[in-house]
Structure formats: structure tokens, C-alpha cells
Image (cartoon, grey):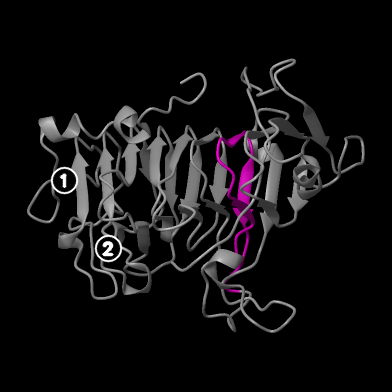
Amino acid sequence: MRVISSVVAAVVIVTGAAGPAEAGACPTLTVALDGSGDHTTVQAAVDAVPDGTPHTIRIRPGRYREVVRVPAGKTGLTMVGSTGDPADVVIDFDNASGTLRPDGTPFGTTGSATVTIAASDFTARHITFSNSFDRAAHPEITATQAVAVKATGDRMLFEHDRFLGHQDTLYADTASVDVRARQYYLRSTIVGDVDFMFGRATAVFDRVTITALDRGGDPNGYLTAASTRADNPHGFLITRSRVTSPAAAQTYFLGRPWHPGGDPAAVAQVVIRDTVLPAAVKSAPWTDFSGFSWRDARLFEYRNTGPGAGIGPDRPQLTDAEAARHTVAAYLGDWRPHGH
């Protein structure tokens, strides 16, 4: 994990399985590769939205090979894939941390993001966000962090989306260390291998499918690398979800605590509850990171099932009373996403 940047903005309300914008809810811009819409790139549509003015950006099918940035001023933005199938609308690029910019300097983890979203009150539905960096094709690049999405806004809803990558796929973060941000990932798919869900946001992953890819080694990878601030009781909550993996048994960690720059005030908080775990998960599923012990972090499970579930001294479990304080509502606080 290292650092990332900023991305999209427009507002709202989407209903129905296919996710069309609610008629009359707010102005709508259409993006289409073939020129049949208002814009041919997602970034052009974002740029056309006035700051602080809710808009819907409706994206027609296609693979949009571009880097997208949604600045913090573009609050109240909704981006929606027009067909209701996230596989039809793909925003993809392939920068890695070690990829060189035109000036010869590396992008870094933050700079590698395909889509960076700094705006609050952002919603995305039925979209695939992808970083297709290929390690095998670029053996000269050793810094292989490659972010699909970096999200730093508050009250962000991602519903029926896909996040595809390998190392550092989804960077759920905040604008700065002294700011908190709530993000709700609902009925979505997240794919990766090393630390592919990471950052300091208060992030809820509800009814998501998490796919841990097979790198062929041991360890194969780590699902999470949270960097929650020590004074924040709510970091990552994975609930009512399913983890799948083609990797060999006992080769995946559920996570490790990330302390950016060795910051002792970053004390990971992760709860994985009511979730199905595959055989690929290690029986001692948490591990140290850069000299920081996982036992000093706040890493817990509760009522997980599947061949990768278990209890024991290396698998801290919440009590029933503690579990009552680690719910979707508790993590989202006074924010209730529209329709949920």
C-alpha cells in the first residue's frame, strides 16, 4: 500500500434493476463511445458537471480505456451503467506504481489508480472499475501496486459494481488522516490478490463476492490491509458476504495491519462476520506487516462458515454483545444510503 488520488462527481437517484436514472431527479449526461451521447469519455462528462450540482452520468456499453478523476467539488454525482450489467460498462487502465510517467518518475500507488473519486455523496451502479496491469508482461516493474479505484469521499455508495485488479485493487481511504469517510459497497464483486482491500475509510462490504486470485505461492496474498486511525472504532466491516478462491488450501491471509510510513496511530480495524470462507484461507488467518504485530490491531471474526472458517487462539472472535456493535448501521452512523 502507498498513496493514491482523486476522481468523479454528479448526483443521483437510480432505481430499478437496470439502474436507469429516476426521471426528473437531476440533470443527466450520457457517455457513449460511438458519439451517440453527450460525451465520448467518462472524464469529459465529469468535467462538464458544475461543482456542487447533482448530476447523473449514464454510461452506455463499452470499454472506456481512460484514467478518470472526480474532484472533491463535484458532490452529488451518480454514475450508472445503462444496461444494469456491470460487465457491459468497463472503465479500465493499466498503470502500476512502478510505471513511469512521461517525466520519468513513477506513478506511485496513488497515481496508479484508474479511477479516483474525491467527491462526497457519490454513487456508482452497474459499472466495472478495472486496473489491467499485467505483472508477467512487465518484469521490469517491481512496484506492482495497481489500483482500480481510490475512493476518499464520505457517503459513497457502490452497488452492483465490479472492482478488478491484482495488488491493491480497491483503496478505500479518506481525504486526510484527520478526516473520516463512510463508504458502502453493496452486492458488488472485488477481485485481487495482495492487500486488495486497503485504506483507512470506514468501509462496509455487504453481500459482496470477494475473489482471491491464485498467484501460485504461499502466501498467495492478503484480502485486507486496513490502516484505520486508532481513534476510529469503525474500519472495515465485511458482512453477509462470500469469499471465493481457486488458490490452494491454507495459502491466503484474511489480512494484515498497514501502518503507512510506519505511523503508529494507524491501527487496523477489520471485522469479518456472517461470511463464507474458502479452504484457501489459512487456519491462522492474520499476519504481521512491516514490523507491526497483527495482535496489536483490531481484527475479529464472527459466525463465519465454509471450509476456511474456524476458531482458535489465532482467530479472535467477537462475543454476541460485541457483534451487536459491529453492524452496517453502526458503521454508517447517521447516513442511510437512498433505498437502503
Horizontal relation, residue 86 to residue 199: left or right: right
Residue 69: x, y in percent? 67, 53
Q: Check if residue 34 falls in the magenta segment.
A: no
Query: Dividing the picture into quarters, in which one does residue 252 lie?
Result: bottom left
100 or 336: which is nearer to us? 336
Nearer to us of marks 1 and 2 is: 2
Say which residue appears at 44% left-offset and 24% top-offset: 336
Say which residue appears at 37% left-offset and 68% top-offset: 260
Horizontal relation, residue 303 to residue 182: left or right: left
Mark 1 or mark 2: name the one nearer the start of the chain.
2
Query: Dividing the picture into quarters, in which one does residue 241 lie?
Result: top left
Q: Quadrant of the N terminus?
A: bottom left
Q: Check if residue 135 falls in the magenta segment.
A: yes
Identity, as a three-letter code, of the amino acid under mark 2: Ala
Classify mark 1: residues with Cα within 10 Å, few (<14), some (14-19) or many (20+): many
From the viewer's perspective, is residue 259 above or below residue 335? below
Residue 331: x, y in percent? 33, 35
Residue 283: x, y in percent? 18, 55
Majority secondary structure of magenta residues: loop
Horizontal relation, residue 87 to residue 29: left or right: left
Distance (Cα) linking label 1 and label 2: 30 Å
Residue 310 marker: 1
Q: From which residue to which does the magenta span run?
A: 112-136
Number of numbered discs on residues: 2
Residue 265 marker: 2
